[in-house]
Structure formats: structure tokens, C-alpha cells
Image: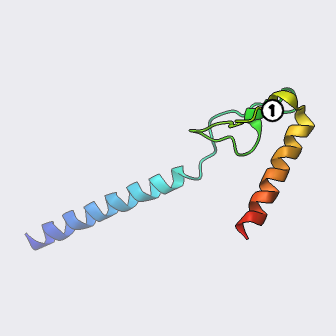
Amino acid sequence: LLSHCLTTSKMKFTATLVALMAASAAAFAPSQAKKASSALSFTPEDLPGALPPMGFWDPLDFASKADENTLRRYREAEVQHGRVGML
């Protein structure tokens, strides 16, 4: 009876260990979603920082008045000022 309990305990431990390894390996698998190339089409939603659930947030509507380079410059300045503000 004791050997049966030890065997069952080892099997549960092994199954748990295998399940944890499989779950952690899935975290490093490549993403299945294809990213659109920004070289062909540029949208403000492609900029870094436009993340769910908020998405692209532009309350003063700067994006409608700016071209691609200006928007990238705005984002660069925003990140730079944010880093300085964290100091």
C-alpha cells in the first residue's frame, strides 16, 4: 500500500512538472499574428505605445495635422520627456 501511494505521488509530481514546463515553453513561442509593414502604410496606431485597451490616444488631435515624420518626432519627444520626468 505504501509503495502504491509513493508511485501515485511521483506520477502526480511528474505530471505537474511536465505541465509547468509546457506552459513556460509556450511563453517563448513566436507570435502567430502577422505585423503589417509600416514601410508601405503608416498609421498613428503603428507607433510604439499605442496599446490596448487605450490604443492611440490623441486628445488634442495633433495626429490629424501632422505627417509621418512629425508624428515620429512627437513620439520621440514624448518618450524623452517621460524619461526625464521619471528622474
Query: Percent x, y for residue 77?
Result: 84, 52
Left or right of residue 60, residue 24 in this image: left
At 77% from the left and 40% from the top, the residue drawn is: 47
On screen, residue 9 above or below 65: below
What quarter of the picture does the N terminus occupy? bottom left
Toward the left, the furthest residue is: 1
Query: What's the image's color scheme?
Result: rainbow
SS assignment at label 1? helix
Left or right of residue 6, residue 49 in this image: right
On screen, residue 35 above or below 29: above
Which residue is nearer to you in this view: 86 or 26? 86
Query: Percent x, y for residue 24?
Result: 49, 56
At 68% from the left and 40% from the top, the residue drawn is: 50
At 46% from the left and 53% from the top, the residue drawn is: 22
Which residue is nearer to you in this view: 13 or 52? 52
- The image quarter containing residue 83 is bottom right
- The image quarter containing residue 60 is top right
Three-letter code for the amino acid on which mark 1 is drawn: Ala
At 78% from the left and 54% from the top, the residue drawn is: 79
Residue hosting label 1: 63
On screen, residue 11 above or below 6: above
What quarter of the picture does the C terminus occupy? bottom right
Query: Percent x, y for residue 73?
Result: 89, 45
**Mark 1 residue crowding within 10 angstroms, few (<14) / some (14–19) / many (20+):** some
